[in-house]
């Protein structure tokens, strides 16, 4: 007997079809009602809306590996501010991240073995708080962002669900 396993995409499509009435958002603006954008890691243990007490329509949620301030994250944050009216940014990284202590060199060699030479870095880091401080500094000096006064950084512990704020070292930069 051949067992056919339904791909996740098919299951997702079936779910949407069965729950369209609950998922539809007629009249909800693409402009976040709380005027905030959140940049977070894509880790499956992080439920950004629930963790931060947000509802659909409250915030833009931008996710990538590590919750890093990459060029693409900066592009999305710029769109969020310049086109859709946000004026606050919250960056959430977390303990036990897959990029923590990963090897840039090993990753690049693995890609090269497959004939891939990306223009981007993995983004591995040794210190989550220092990496977050660096990202916050980049956001606070990014001319692409017209609103840089309210930028905050947090590290989430998925084991305890605690969130700790990471303050910049430079005086006067906290929003």
Image (cartoon, helix red, strand yellow):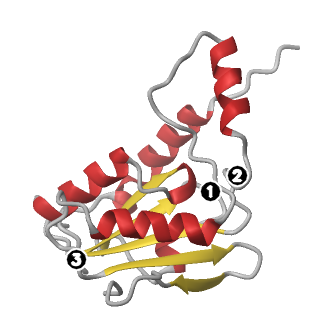
Q: Alpha-carbon neighbours of circle 2 within 10 Å: few (<14), some, or many (≥20)?
A: some
Residue indicated by mark 1 = 43
Q: Which of the two labelled residues, at mark 3 and mark 2, occupies the earlier sequence position?
A: 3
Secondary structure under the numbered disc 1 in the rendered image:
loop
Left or right, residue 126 beside residue 30: right
Q: CA–CA distance between discs 1 and 2?
A: 8 Å
Q: Would you say the residues marked 1 and 2 are in contact, meaning their CB atoms lie under 8 Å apart?
A: yes
Q: Secondary structure at mark 3?
A: loop
Disc 3: which residue: 35
Name, please, the residue furthest toward the top: 115
Where does label 2 land, which residue? 98
Discs 1/2, front: 2
Query: Circle 2 — which element?
Result: loop
The residue under the point 59% across, 75% down is 155
Q: CA distance from mark 3 to mark 2?
A: 30 Å
Relative vertical location of residue 9 with respect to residue 127 in this rendering, above or below:
above
Residue 77 coordinates in the image, percent (x, y): 27, 59
Of tags 3 and 2, which is closer to the observer?
A: 2
Q: Is residue 106 left or right of residue 66?
A: right
| Residue 136: % across, % down | 40, 69
- Lower sequence index among marks 1 and 2: 1
Residue 62, above or below 34: above
């Amino acid at each position: 007997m051949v067992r056919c396993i339904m791909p996740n995409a098919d299951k997702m499509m079936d779910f949407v079809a069965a729950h369209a009435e609950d998922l539809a958002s007629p009249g909800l603006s693409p402009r976040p009602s709380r005027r905030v954008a959140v940049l977070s890691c894509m880790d499956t243990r992080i439920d950004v809306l629930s963790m931060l007490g947000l509802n659909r329509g409250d915030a833009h949620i931008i996710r990538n590996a590590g919750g890093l301030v990459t060029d693409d994250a900066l592009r999305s944050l710029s769109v969020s501010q310049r086109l859709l009216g946000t004026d606050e940014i919250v960056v959430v990284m977390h303990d036990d991240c897959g990029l923590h202590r990963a090897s840039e060199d090993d990753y690049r060699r693995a890609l090269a073995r497959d004939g891939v030479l990306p223009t981007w870095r993995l983004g591995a880091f040794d210190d989550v708080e220092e990496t977050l401080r660096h990202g916050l500094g980049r956001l606070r000096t990014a001319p692409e962002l017209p609103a840089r006064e309210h930028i905050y950084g947090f590290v989430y512990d998925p084991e305890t669900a605690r969130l700790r704020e990471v303050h910049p070292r430079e005086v006067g930069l906290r929003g």
